[in-house]
Image (cartoon, helix red, strand yellow):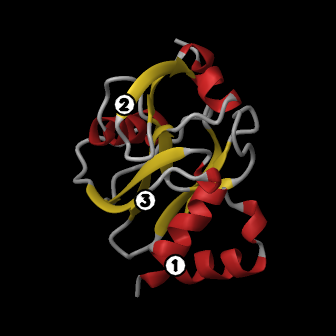
Amino acid sequence: MSESDEIFDVVDSEDMVIGKASRLQVHNNDLMHRSVHILVFNSTGSLFLQKRAMIKDESPGLWDSSAAGHVESEEDYITCAKRELNEELSLSDVQLDEVLSIPAQSMTFWEHVRVYKCVTDSNICINKNEISEGRYMKLSEVRALMQLNPEIHTSTFSFIYANYINKLG
């Protein structure tokens, strides 16, 4: 199934399902829907960030969370998070913990977002169809990049950074 064929649940401001629509309909009409972002840390506390492929319809070429994606119709958040980790980074069998819930808003492209984190030293193999590059960064490096060049990051990652990552030790 291509991205344009994907079907998402349309939700209201309380994240209750009110219908279904294609990816194109959801994005073209600013309909509220769901997504996940996953923060992958290694045992030394560095955070893996991905640079989105230039072919992506949202935020191409910008730095983002380790993995992210839309929750498909009738899928729950945690199932989506596990699927995206496997599809984008070839990671499976990791313990995911929810760390943040973001209500739908313009900054998130009208997505209700659940943010998960995991800690792993497993080998990451990026999906070149989704990600142009990726690497682990120390949190001090992430902070410096956010201060110097906030525009090179997706708006959702900027929100996650301000409300979660920047508060870490």
Asked whether the residues under the numbered discs 3 and 2 touch, taking CB atoms below 8 Å apart as contact, a structural biologist would say no
- The mark nearer the N terminus, 1 or 2, is 2
Where residue 139 is drawn, which disc sits there? 1
Disc 2 target residue: 17
- Looking at the rendered structure, the secondary structure element under dot 1 is helix
Determine the residue positioned at 32% across, 41% down: 77
Could you say which is closer to the camera, residue 137 or residue 74?
74
| Residue type (three-letter) at the residue carrying disc 1 | Leu
Disc 3 target residue: 39
Q: Residues within 10 Å of mark 2 (few under 14, many from 20)?
A: some
Q: Position of residue 104 (x, y in %)?
A: 51, 50
Where residue 71 is drawn, which disc sits there? none
Q: Position of residue 64 (x, y in %)?
A: 60, 55
| Residue type (three-letter) at the residue carrying disc 2 | Val
Could you say which is closer to the camera, residue 55 or residue 18?
18
Q: Is residue 25 above or below residue 120?
A: above
Q: CA distance from mark 1 to mark 3?
A: 12 Å
Q: CA distance from mark 3 to mark 2?
A: 26 Å
Tell me which corner region of the image, top left, top right, bottom left or bottom right, holds residue 152: bottom right
Q: Position of residue 112 (x, y in %)?
A: 45, 47
Q: Quadrant of the C terminus?
A: bottom left
